[in-house]
Image (cartoon, rainbow, N blue to C red):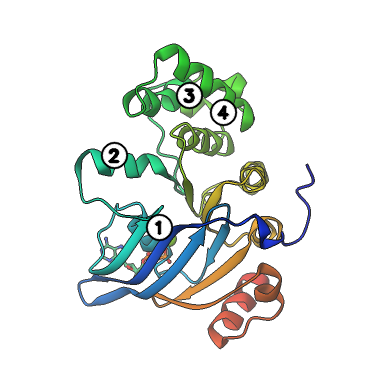
Amino acid sequence: MDHTGATRPTSHLGAPLVELESVNKHFGDLHVLRDIDLTVRQGEVLVVIGPSGSGKSTLCRAINRLETVDDGTIRIDGQPLPAEGRELAKLRADVGMVFQSFNLFAHKTVLDNVTLGPRKVRRLSKADAEAEALELLDRVGVKNQAAKLPAQLSGGQQQRVAIARSLAMHPKVMLFDEPTSALDPEMINEVLDVMVGLAHDGMTMIVVTHEMGFARKAADRVVFMADGMIVEQATPEEFFTNPRSDRAKDFLSKILTH
Ligand SMILES: Nc1ncnc2c1ncn2[C@@H]1O[C@H](COP(=O)(O)OP(=O)(O)O)[C@@H](O)[C@H]1O
Ligand SMILES: [Mg+2]
């Protein structure tokens, strides 16, 4: 498959999958999410970009309900976020999340890291979970590392295992919060390539990243956040070549110069 194409046509987009309506969140006096309205459609790849402290991680954590919000509504596939219990576990399976740090279980093998969730939450047998895990590890290019412990892998390999672990839950949407920012430069592309492959396979993705190459290759839309607000949104091409707001122009001039 050709992963080098510019912005994809939007005809592949389906029904609304992640919907935020007038979402607000405070940390004490700090208003970190301000009236966020955002709809992500099935198959859409949304890149979220913006200065440090603008609320990008809080947005992701709110969608996964790792943070509660003060008011407004968040719906996944038409359902409001559940507060607790079995429904919350189901939500966590539906909404995969990959963080900057890989959060793999250090004392478990790569294979066990990937099979744990499916066995517990999806109630797969050991054999079925392992067969599927090996397929996923193959898809992200680390099948031959399955028997190792995470510490025996490079950062890029560990992050690809973390992606496989999320995929093993059969999520409806994947959230990535700066998945390459803790990696050595030579490992960034191996992770981005896996993400580009996922995007082309039709996964719905919300990706916080400043990797413009990824945004141009894979994103349908770029959302620029500052001070807890969505300041502008556009196609990657429009956003990177012709940002409209002064905040975005200023931000891009800073990330483009180094
Ligand atoms: N648990 C928390 N308690 C208090 N303040 C927080 C907490 N998490 C984030 N913040 C603050 O909220 C703002 C937004 O943070 P964050 O969503 O992490 O931004 P970003 O990911 O864009 O850098 C920042 O000012 C941050 O310091
Ligand atoms: Mg962040």
Q: Residue at x 64, y 81 (%)?
A: 243
In front: mark 1 or mark 2? 2
In the picture, measured across the screen, residue 235 lies left or right of residue 55, that is right
**Image x and y of residue 155, in percent:** 54, 38
Q: Nearer the viewer, mark 3 or mark 4?
A: 4
- Disc ID at residue 110: 3
Classify 90 as above or below 153: below
Determine whether label 3 and label 2 are within 8 Å by CB: no
State the SS at label 4: helix
Q: Quick one: 125 or 113, which is closer to the camera?
A: 125
Looking at the image, tell me whether mark 2 or mark 4 is earlier in sequence order. Answer: 2
Mark 1–mark 4 Cα distance, whole angstroms, equals 24 Å
On screen, residue 91 versus residue 133, left or right, reads left
Q: Residue at x 48, y 17 (%)?
A: 130
The residue tagged 4 is 136
The numbered disc on residue 60 is 1
Instruction: Give the mark, 3 or 1, whose residue is nearer the N terminus.
Output: 1
Q: Are marks 2 and 4 in contact (CB under 8 Å)?
A: no
Going by the numbered disc 2, the residue's amino acid type is Ala
Distance between the Cα atoms at labels 2 and 4? 22 Å
Ligand 2 lies in quarter: bottom left
- The residue tagged with tag 3: helix, strand or loop? helix
| Kind of residue at badge 1 | Cys
Left or right for 51, reference 64? right
Residue under label 2, please give it.
89
